[in-house]
Image: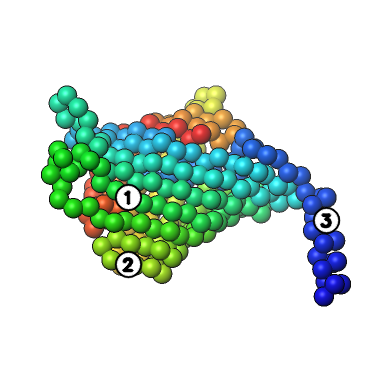
Amino acid sequence: MKKYFIILVFLARTISAQTNFSMFPQKNLVPQFTANATAHRMSFEKNIKINNFFGSIGTIRPLVLAEFGSTKAEASIAGSMHTTLQKSPGHWQVIDVAFFVDVLFDVALTPTTQIRFGPGHTSHHLADDAFELLNYKKSINYVRDYYQLFAIQHINFLNGFVYSGAFYNYIFRIDSVRVDTWIFQVGAELFNTHISQNIFFYTGFDVKFHGELEYGTSQNYQIGIKYEQGDRRAIRFAYNYHTGLEERGQFFRDRTSTNTLGFYVDF
């Protein structure tokens, strides 16, 4: 046993000596999942047809980057708050609030292939205005604790990347306890076309398959313009078409078909 312990210590010291560590790196290894409606970022969307708005504030912050040969690994924390606002004469009404928190571990296996995994939590709530001004009678206790695993592949001839992965919900409560369920997610950002310095046209889509609802889908299709720096920070203006199941937990049974114009900041 002592021999194996000495070998493990030697291997750990060898790997440590050959690994470069950077604290608080400026660049995220994995790009933002552009059309994901619940991404960690700052956003503000306007429903084109009615006076409803969708907003979020949040970010993904890298904590440490490790480089071992051609392989890179990054640990990050991420959090965001998402809300729905309804504009009425003289005031705003806050309909619902959703919180997302993730601990992310990203690994760049090659310059074009990455994986992401880690635990996370989300809870979705009705806000006071929904009860007091809009006469909602009862909220849903919507809570999910999960592990996620994603693969990201950059495709040069499409000028973009695709991703696919899954959430395993080990705690899931909505109208009933629904543990051991899955949510699958696929998406892409494609056809990045250079317009001028740091400004690009792009398209994207995101689809989630909800195991708690017989794998019905939440879909978003996006087309827009972005100003992007080399550290993956970006400002975007985009049109979205949301369709399928609601991503807001308080309305999880509802289906939507919504056109929005949005402004996004990826920190």
Image mark for residue 13: 3
Disc 3 is placed on an element classified as helix
Residue 118 higher or lower than 3, as above or below: above
Q: Could you tell me how far apart the alpha carbons at marks 2 and 1 are, in whole angstroms? A: 15 Å
Kind of residue at disc 3? Arg
> Residue placed at 22% from the left, 52% from the top?
139
Identify the image quadrant of residue 183. bottom left
> Residue placed at 67% from the left, 44% from the top?
65
Of residues 50 and 89, the one drawn nearer to the viewer in this rendering:
89
Q: Which residue does the numbered mark 1 point to in the structure image?
A: 124
> Residue placed at 77% from the left, 49% from the top?
19
Label 2: how many Cα within 10 Å (few below 14, some 14–19, many 20+) = few
> Residue placed at 49% from the left, 28% from the top?
227
Residue 227 higher or lower than 67, as above or below: above
Disc 2 is placed on an element classified as loop
Label 1: how many Cα within 10 Å (few below 14, some 14–19, many 20+) = many
Label 3: how many Cα within 10 Å (few below 14, some 14–19, many 20+) = few
Identify the image quadrant of residue 263. top left
Of residues 41 and 79, the one drawn nearer to the viewer in this rendering:
79
Q: Could you tell me how far apart the alpha carbons at marks 3 and 2 are, in whole angstroms? A: 46 Å
Kind of residue at disc 2? Val
Point out the tag, 2 or 1, that comes first from the N-terminus: 1
Q: Which residue does the numbered mark 2 point to in the structure image?
A: 177
Q: Is residue 124 left or right of residue 57?
A: left
Identify the image quadrant of residue 202. top left
Kind of residue at disc 1? His
Residue 154 higher or lower than 129, as above or below: below
**Residue 234 x %, y %:** 50, 32
